[in-house]
Image (cartoon, grey):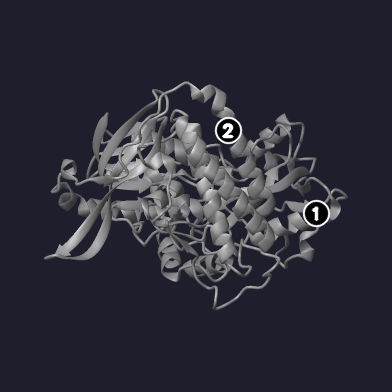
Amino acid sequence: MEYQFDLLVVGSGIAGLTFALKAAASGTVAIVTKKDKLETSTNYAQGGIASVLGPDDSFQLHIEDTLNAGDGLCHQDVVDMVVHNGPDRVRELANLGVPFDHGSSQMAPFDLGREGGHTRNRIVHAHDMTGQAVEQVLVAAAEANPNIHIFENHLVLDLIIQHRSLKAGTVTLQHEDVCRGAYVLDSQHEEVHTFLAQAVLLCTGGAGKVYLYTSNPDVAAGDGLAIAYRAGARLANLEFVQFHPTCLYHPQAKNFLISEAVRGEGGRLIDRRGRAFMEHYHPLKDLAFRDVVARAIDTEMKKSGDDCVFLDISHRDAEFIQQRFPNIYQKCLSLGIDITRDPIPVVPAAHYLCGGILTDLQGRTSIENLYAIGECACTGLHGANRLASNSLLEAMVFAHEASLHCSSNMESWRRRSLREIPPCFPTPPKQSSGSGLQSEMVLITHNWDIIRRLMWNYVGIVRTDKRLALAQNHIAQISLEIREHMPNIPLNSDLVELQNLALVAELIIRCAIQRKESRGLHYNLDHPQKDDPNWQRDTVVVKHQTEEFFCASSK
Ligand code: SIN
């Protein structure tokens, strides 16, 4: 089937929904999302949204904290824009009905939490379920908007890219790539559809599933990064994977985060013997930047041989704990841990990708009419390490800027007919038929497991040149196996995700190998120092002319 919309949004988290709601005033919007519309990383965000809303705070302080966390790689113009726009975007959400916790007076309308690296309380939150509250309000608003159509269980395979040559007489001056839509797999009905659009917005979130342990939901397989790379877009800074210091360590707890806000309210990290250790690592102790805290925990676990460390907030009033952290309290209690009395077993886990698809201040990528917003983008805000709770903020601000840009271009875009597009790359994926799927599913699950374990062990919190080189070899083997053996398996979402995951793992390793220094989240024992000014720059990757991907072409 072929669909035509003015705008195609891929992903239904805060970035995609905010954009869609704003852009729907100027055209029709399709949101495609690969599972249930609520199954997004946004939905699991606990902490909140950082913004300058307190009487003792200032834009300058939030800017400085963001720059300090970013360790020399933030883009100052982006940081300025995001921080200054924050309060307006937060108030928009509150007006839409997001139930943020109230402050004590009109001067302080929101209750503001504190997280690592912030010098002021500035985290707007809805208890410890901020993302869920935001997601529900935005989804309800999108569903009520007649210009927005949500397609669940639709996974984008590849972008439709038109190659345009600008000629003067017989001389070709320039080649331009323009995004015209996407091929999308309806995974319930196992059909591939063509979505044509004036512009495509990638809002696909992160790639935590590249790692064995992650706080991310299963959907975070790096799809947007992979399809943008295959289409020829520029990606950057993928070596900067943020490991959240405190995920719940329990055999029955999958991907459950213990919010940094717990440390913001006085929680302390201790070892098995009850000794606090953060004072040995940083003057800010438990509220140091995330890379520092995650590395400290990693070091403590390696020194002691223990499987986890502990986070203790039991010295705070029990009623306060239950009210401030109802979700964490209930989840832990269901596993036999009463956090008002017991320390919580925690380990670091992959949480957020600071790099992504390179964009400008309007969210535009290096391909015309292709935008990227949210975790899949590399805007320049986070640099080498994201400041806590700056991610929902970034998504809202860039969704706003991109919607203004798209709306102001919509009329001129509409003047060209989408149907008159010259030959595009890639041609529609052909669905191979056959009965191979059942017997060959093991190829998919086995390789998926290998990639995640490999990335955890060789490309994790602490890296070395040797481990990175070994990881690169292993991934090259797996990618070869995928290219050579898997095209015979009928197209299905697990296969597409595996291909994407392998590609994103390869790109993370490629960026990590390039950066011969330690900075922010990238720590390499063979290059333990920061190397300014040589490495005070982004690590950019772009597809080689000769690279091939089986999903991207009909064979
Ligand atoms: C948290 O609640 O600790 C997560 C906040 C974030 O990642 O920004």
Callout 2–callout 1 Cβ contact below 8 Å? no
Residue 376 image point, x, y percent: 46, 50
The residue closer to the viewer here, 94 or 467, is: 467
Sequence-wise first label, 2 or 1: 1
Residue at 28% over, 52% down? 369
Snapshot quadrant of residue 121: bottom right
Mark 1 lies within 8 Å of ligand 1 (Cβ measured): no
Snapshot quadrant of residue 154: top left
Residue type at mark 2 is Leu
Residue at 53% over, 68% down? 67
325 is higher (above) or lower (below) than 232? above
Residue at 49% over, 57% down? 51
| SS of the residue under disc 2 | helix
- Point out the image quarter for the N terminus: top left
Answer left or right for 234 relative to 420. right
321 is higher (above) or lower (below) than 295? above
Give the alpha-carbon distance from disc 2 to disc 1, as whole Å: 33 Å
Few, some or many residues within 10 Å of mark 1 (<14, 14–19, 20+): few
The residue to which callout 1 is attached is 302
Q: Is residue 123 visible?
A: no
Q: Which mark is residue 443?
A: 2
The residue closer to the viewer here, 107 or 283, is: 283
Answer left or right for 326 relative to 36. right
Please tell me how many numbered marks the rendered image carries.
Answer: 2
Answer left or right for 166 relative to 108. left
Q: Is residue 9 visible?
A: yes
The residue closer to the viewer here, 114 or 286, is: 286
445 is higher (above) or lower (below) than 83? above
Residue 346 image point, x, y percent: 73, 45
Residue 100 image point, x, y percent: 50, 44
